[in-house]
Image (cartoon, helix red, strand yellow):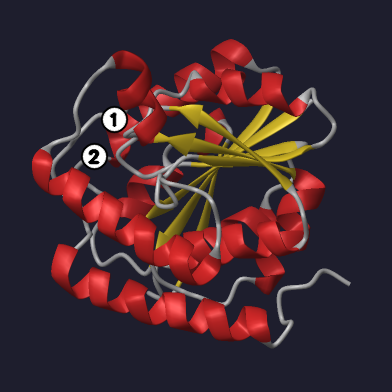
Amino acid sequence: MKISLVVPAYNESKRIIHTLEEATYYMKSHFECYEIIIVDDGSTDDTVAIAETFSNLGVKVLKQPHAGKGKTLKSGILAATGDYIFFTDADLPYALDNIEVAIKHFKDETTALVIGARDLYHAENGIPYPFYRNIMSKAFSFIVNLFLNLDVKDTQCGFKAFKKDTAHTLFPLVEINGFGFDIELLKIARINHLKIVRIPVKLMHSSGSKVNPFKDSIKMLRDIKTVYKNAKRGLYEIR
């Protein structure tokens, strides 16, 4: 069994060393066969040079012009060769042992995707969301499910996992280059009746987020419209 971990990176020189130290130690400790793919999204700092120093520890670096998280992850996922393919954010905001949890769910042959769910973690542990995050999350979830009928409360969690065949079938259909790619990916899965399992994950906050709450929210509303139109046109059906 081979495991692929795909990590998108854009100007991450300040934290990529810690990320790769953690990731390589975890993967080497738990799996005999693995690869860590850092997909650089046109960084202008030393992200690539630093990541390449880990090449002897199972790290591969893909470089592309700056295009956005969606396109960056698409490149990494389609290059991945593992039996199970995972992606997470460059600051490792979710514990890597969620990988083992996801693999257990993949033992059910009907499971196609395993995705992190921050809302389940808060619900199961009785931990309230920060007020502003709760309002934004509920509003976005309402809009997404109103138009796209995903039945997924936390679409934007940066921890998702796939069987290789599933990933290499879904991602060629993903067109959105920015943060809205998650909702497009999940809509494609829903249209094709693929089983999605949600697992509770704890978000560990860190500084340096690339998300602009105002600008990116507007872009994602546009992405919802794009996904709605594409679904109506039958562009997401796997043939």
Give residue 18's mark: 1
Viewer can see residue 72 = no
- In the image, is 187 to the left or to the right of 40? right
CB atoms at circles 1 and 2 under 8 Å apart? yes
The one nearer the camera, 231 or 151, is 151
Identify the residue at horizontal 50%, vertical 75% (top origin).
176
**Where is 68 relative to 36, above or below?**
below
- In the image, is 155 to the left or to the right of 46? right
The total number of labels drawn is 2
Give residue 15's mark: 2
The one nearer the camera, 22 or 169, is 169
SS of the residue under disc 1: helix
- In the image, is 128 to the left or to the right of 26? left
SS of the residue under disc 2: loop
Coordinates of residue 59 in the picture (x, y in percent): 53, 39
The N terminus is located in which quarter? top right
Q: Amino acid at mark 2?
A: Arg
**Where is 28 relative to 131, above or below?**
above
The one nearer the camera, 19 or 100, is 100
Coordinates of residue 60 in the picture (x, y in percent): 56, 46
Identify the residue at horizontal 36%, vertical 34% (top origin).
118
The C terminus is located in which quarter? bottom right
**Where is 52 relative to 169, above or below?**
above
Question: Label 1 to label 2, Cα distance in Å?
Answer: 6 Å
Coordinates of residue 110 in the picture (x, y in percent): 82, 36
Viewer can see residue 210 = yes
